[in-house]
Structures are given as C-alpha cells and as structure tokens.
Image (tube, rainbow, N blue to C red):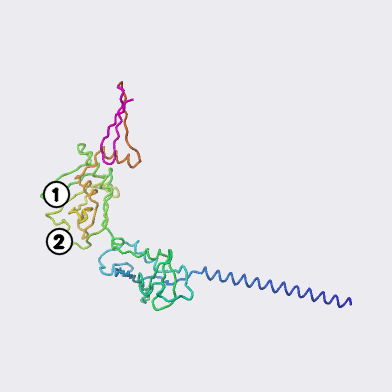
Amino acid sequence: MEKKTRTIGILLLVLLVLLITFFGLKKWNTSKSEAEEKKKENAVVHIFETDSLESIEYKEASGEEMSFVKEDDTWEYAPDTTIALTESSMQNMEDAFSDIRAVKEIKNPDDLSDYGFDSPDYNLTLTGKDGEAHKFLIGNASGENYYFMEDGTEKVYTVSADLISEMVWQLADVAEKDSFVTVTSDNFVKETVTKPGDEVKTYEADNEDQEDTVTSIMTALSGFYFTDCADYHVTDATLGNYGLAEDQRTKVELTYKDTSDDDKEKTVTFYVGSKDDSATYYYVQMDGSQRVSRVLIDTVEKALGWKVDSSAERKLNKSAKKGKGMMSFRKGQSPFFECTFLQIYPQESLTLKNQQ
C-alpha cells in the first residue's frame, strides 16, 4: 500500500512537471510569436531603393509635369538642359526618391479605385542607373499619408506626405539664380546710375552731402535679392520686352572693395528695366548674363537713390522693429503739457494737448 502511494505521488509529480513545462513552452512560443509579429510590423519596407537615379519625372492630375535627367553626375532640366540647377536642391530630391519607404503595407487591399489609383493625383517615374524605369501611382490622401503603389502590381502602401513635398513645380525653386555682391558700409565706394538719355548721377561713400542717400543706398544694396527668373535665355531681340534694350534701361555701376582680395576696388554692372505686370518687381539683368530676374520695386528704387530712406525714417523703422514708439513730453510754467507721438504708419506727428 505504501509502495502504491509512493508511485502515485511520483506520477503526480511527473505530471506537474509536464504541465509546468507545457504551459511554460506555450507561453514562450506565444511571446516569441508576438515578438516576431511585432518585429515584422516594425520592419522597414523599402518600396523602391537604388544607389543612384538617372532620371526623375512626375506629373500631376491637372497635366502639369516636371522632368529631370542626370548627365555626367549633373542634374539637368530635361526640357531645357542649358538651364543650370542648384546642386543641393536636386541632391535633396534624389535622396528622397532613391529610397522610398512605406509607412504601412495594406494587407488584402480592396478595389484599387478605392485608393484613388484609377485616377491618381500624381504619376512618378524613376529610372535607376540600370536603365530600368519604375512607374508609381500616388492616389488619395490618407490622413498625413498617401496611398502608393507601383504600376503593374497590386501591392498597396501608404507613404509619408513628405515624399510628395519633394516634388517642386516651379523651375525657379531649383534653378540657379544670378548672384549679387555683398555690400556693407565698410566696402561701398560709389555707385553711378545712368538713366536713358545719359542722365548720370554718382553717389560716393565719402561725400558728406549725400550721407542720407548713400546710407539708404547701402542698406538697400545689402538686401538686393533676385526673387526669381523671368527669362533664362533673353536675347537682343527680346530685351525690349523687359525694358532692358540699350535705349530703355538704366545702367548701374557699383564700385566696392573686395574684402576677400586685399580690399581691391572692383566694379559690378547691372541694368534695371521696366516694372513687371504686377507692378511689384523691376526686371533686372546682370551685365553679361542671359537671365532676366525680378527684384522688389522698393529695393531697386532705394538702391538707385530714386527713393531715399531718410535718417528720421530709418530711426522710426528701427524703433518699429524693436516694438517701440517715440514719445516726447514738454512741461513748463504753462498749465498745459504737450505730448507728441511719432507714428510709424503713416509717418506723421500727432499733437495732443491736455489741461492739467
């Protein structure tokens, strides 16, 4: 009897060990499966990946399209390869399209039209260095993402809207602009402005009688910026369209000290034409350049001395930038005090008198 009891005890103990082992293995397998599933979910899905792109083309549903090709490791605008592009802008675009990653893969997708692929918002074609073109369809927006698939497949993904933002639609956003010299009060020497009809005016840094005008000119020149390009290939025949024909334009010769070259005096020449149709910009051409650029009217007129930012005006502008007004009080034996506010917009004086 005692032997039988011992045997049952041993069997129960073995059964308990087996049960513990079974449930332990089951839990371990479940945890392993969950971990693998989570790992799979978190795995980066590369929809498209290449070491180097040779062409980038994209088209909007409206029909607007842009196309770029790479020649000798230099990106070019396909419709006109003579237009130089900024290297950094094109490199950013290539980096974005060389490795397209999915935010999520849609398992068992429904009808492709449900995602907007029957009439995609965008078509994107990428060609790698192997010469193979890959066409992608970009469908409806999904929150902050877009539905995305390679044409000819039925795999549906979502990609970040950041990918779409890499598509530039204005050539000016990636095309090189003409550069302008850096002008400060330390390196400005003089400026000669020749208007049509040979009316010449010269402004010199050391001319005390021109102090306000020269200061205004230097300030404007320090912010002389080409907003965009109106014409990348202007010719003698088309210069007149911008008021830049020889008998129309204003010639500007700017002399400055080149601080990077032992303060040697150098002269840069540019031409100012007519205002554009919006009456917001002047057409400007650098001497020797085929580009016609746009520069804000106010900047041009102050840079040429046509409009002077007077000393008082500059003080007001400086105060306005600091968020301060200008106020003066005058008290005397009179039972009145006078308070003068110098207003910024418009620049007028307002006098208020109050009896104490």
Give the magenta range: 334-356
Quarter of image, res 332? top left
Residues at marks 1 and 2 touching, judged by CB atoms closer than 8 Å:
no
User: Residue 207: x, y in percent?
Assistant: 20, 38
Residue 172: quadrant of the picture = bottom left
Give the vertical position of 251 relative to 28 (above or below).
above
Residue that extends furthest to the top in the rendered view of this protein: 333
The residue that appears at 22% across and 51% down in the rendered structure is: 268
Q: Residue at x 70, y 74 (%)?
A: 22
Residue visible at 30% across and 49% down? 260
Give the left or right position of residue 258, taking residue 13 as reference: left
Q: Is residue 146 visible?
A: yes
Q: Position of residue 331 (x, y in %)?
A: 32, 25
Quadrant assignment, res 90: bottom left
Task: Name, please, the residue furthest toward the right.
Answer: 1
Q: Give SS at disc 2.
A: loop
Q: Give the position of the N terminus as an image quadrant.
A: bottom right
Whole-percent x, y for residue 335 in the image: 31, 23
Three-letter code for the amino acid on which mark 2 is drawn: Asp
**Which residue carries the number 1 mark?**
195
Q: Which residue is mark 2?
A: 236
In the rendered image, the vertical position of residue 48 relative to residue 226, given as above or below:
below
